[in-house]
Image (cartoon, coloured by chain):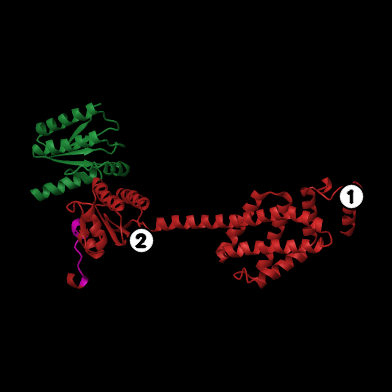
């Protein structure tokens, strides 16, 4: 299952579907970094609104995506984590430390615009 | 009544047996006789009972008219329970009665007291009626005692069950009241916690907060624990988890009002204070939240 990656100006938006296999996640990780390189994007928003569970592999993959993208000088924001998923994640100790998060796509874009306005 | 006694005596003599339980005087037959007597003397016995209630200073929260009305219904239910042995119906009646009188301030000892008084009044009336026939009196009491005990028990249990139901209801209401999530500014929520937090309440708190963050699109949450005296390690961990989960929803949490004891607990469990944003009191917390959100509060005099 391919995860659609959309371009929005200087940003890329990747929207997770509900059930992503480990292979899908690996594919996405490589795909996203390639796209960042290709479009010289300044940030990536990963929208996980549709995910109703987050296991440790998915969580680790998200952190790795963020780290890899940072190595390209770009920012990552994870948006749309559901309350129940957030609760389950912290109980399992999956905190997505070091990765920016926002409530939803709108907030994620607002956050990035704020950051880049300040940087400019 | 006299006629009845003579008939029984005749029966025993005719059969020429050692006095023992004769088929016509099986427990159910005796109970029927007993119930008939209680119904026949209803007014008098009920009046006597009400007098005893007043003398013993029970049901002081109720007026004479109310006592009389309730006494009538209790008396009738009592006699009916003796007759039908339908104790579930009696228990339902007791719970219903309790629902009416508990809000009036009637206590358990009063309810048990009046039932035992009724038991006594009825027993004495049996003594009076069968005083000339000791054996019959014994047999009547053999039928009456277990049923009367069961009735007293049933009513008391019904009353207590109703009280417990009310207590559970109140506990639930208190629990819900005490974890409100309040929006005080756009994007700013306050969660004032007061009292004892147990793991269950902590969990409910977290769920309520996360839902509130999503509904109100909050970017900052101030959790004030000034009203919490102590927290064990489990609950402290819950608090840390709440902060982390809120962050996953894009909200920053500021914890205010930590008592020295709680501060100690947090240090003991090794909370990474870098992860936890804390401010001394609620006022400070709100001020910092406003700064984070880009508000600046100025007095009107200043503004001019």
Please say if the residues under marks 2 and 1 sit with CB atoms less than 8 Å apart: no
The residue marked by circle 2 belongs to what chain?
Answer: B
Question: Distance between the Cα atoms at labels 2 and 1?
Answer: 73 Å
Q: Secondary structure at mark 2?
A: loop
Q: Which residue is mark 2?
A: B195
Residue A6 at least partly seen: yes
Residue B228 on image: x %, y %: 32, 61
Q: Secondary structure at mark 1?
A: helix
Chain in red on the image: B
Residue B46 on image: x %, y %: 73, 65
Q: Which residue is mark 1?
A: B11
Residue B123 on image: x %, y %: 74, 61
Horizontal relation, residue B214 to residue B296: left or right: right
Horizontal relation, residue A113 to residue B121: left or right: left
The part of the chain drawn in magenta is B290-300
Residue A8 at least partly seen: no
Chain in green on the image: A
Q: Quadrant of residue A87?
A: top left
Q: Quadrant of residue B284?
A: bottom left
- Disc on res. A83: none
Residue B61 on image: x %, y %: 59, 70
Q: Quadrant of the C terminus of chain B?
A: bottom left
């Amino acid at each position: 299952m391919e995860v659609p990656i959309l371009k929005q100006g200087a940003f890329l938006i990747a929207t997770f579907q509900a059930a992503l296999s480990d292979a899908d996640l690996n594919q996405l990780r490589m795909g996203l970094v390639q796209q960042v390189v290709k479009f010289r994007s300044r940030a990536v928003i990963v929208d996980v609104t549709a995910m109703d569970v987050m296991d440790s592999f998915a969580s680790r993959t998200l952190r790795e995506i963020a780290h890899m993208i940072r190595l390209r000088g770009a920012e990552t924001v994870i948006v749309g984590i559901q309350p129940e998923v957030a609760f389950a994640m912290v109980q399992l100790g999956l905190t997505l430390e070091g990765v920016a998060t926002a409530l939803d796509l709108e907030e994620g874009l607002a956050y990035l615009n704020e950051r880049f306005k300040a940087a400019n | 009544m006299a006629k009845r006694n003579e008939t029984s005596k005749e029966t025993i003599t005719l059969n020429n047996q050692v006095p023992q339980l004769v088929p016509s005087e099986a427990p159910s037959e005796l109970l029927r006789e007993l119930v008939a007597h209680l119904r026949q003397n209803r007014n008098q016995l009920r009046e006597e009972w009400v007098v005893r209630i007043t003398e013993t200073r029970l049901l002081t929260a109720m007026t004479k008219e109310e006592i009389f009305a309730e006494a009538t219904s209790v008396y009738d239910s009592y006699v009916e329970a003796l007759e039908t042995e339908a104790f579930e119906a009696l228990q339902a009646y007791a719970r219903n009665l309790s629902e009416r009188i508990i809000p009036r301030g009637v206590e358990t000892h009063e309810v048990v007291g009046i039932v035992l008084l009724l038991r006594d009044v009825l027993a004495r009336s049996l003594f009076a009626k069968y005083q000339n026939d000791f054996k019959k009196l014994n047999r009547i009491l053999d039928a009456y005692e277990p049923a009367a005990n069961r009735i007293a028990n049933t009513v008391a249990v019904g009353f207590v069950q109703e009280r417990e139901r009310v207590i559970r209801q109140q506990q639930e209401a208190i629990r819900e009241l005490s974890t409100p999530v309040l929006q005080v500014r756009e994007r700013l929520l306050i969660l004032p916690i007061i009292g004892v937090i147990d793991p269950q309440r902590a969990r409910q708190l977290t769920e309520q907060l996360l839902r509130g963050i999503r509904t109100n699109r909050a970017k900052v949450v101030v959790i004030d624990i000034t009203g919490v005296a102590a927290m064990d390690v489990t609950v402290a961990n819950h608090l840390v988890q709440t902060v982390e989960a809120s962050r996953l929803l894009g909200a920053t949490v500021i914890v205010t009002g930590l008592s020295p004891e709680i501060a100690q607990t947090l240090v003991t469990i090794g909370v990474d204070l870098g992860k936890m944003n804390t401010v001394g009191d609620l006022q400070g917390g709100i001020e910092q939240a406003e700064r984070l959100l880009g508000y600046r509060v100025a007095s009107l005099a200043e503004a001019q």
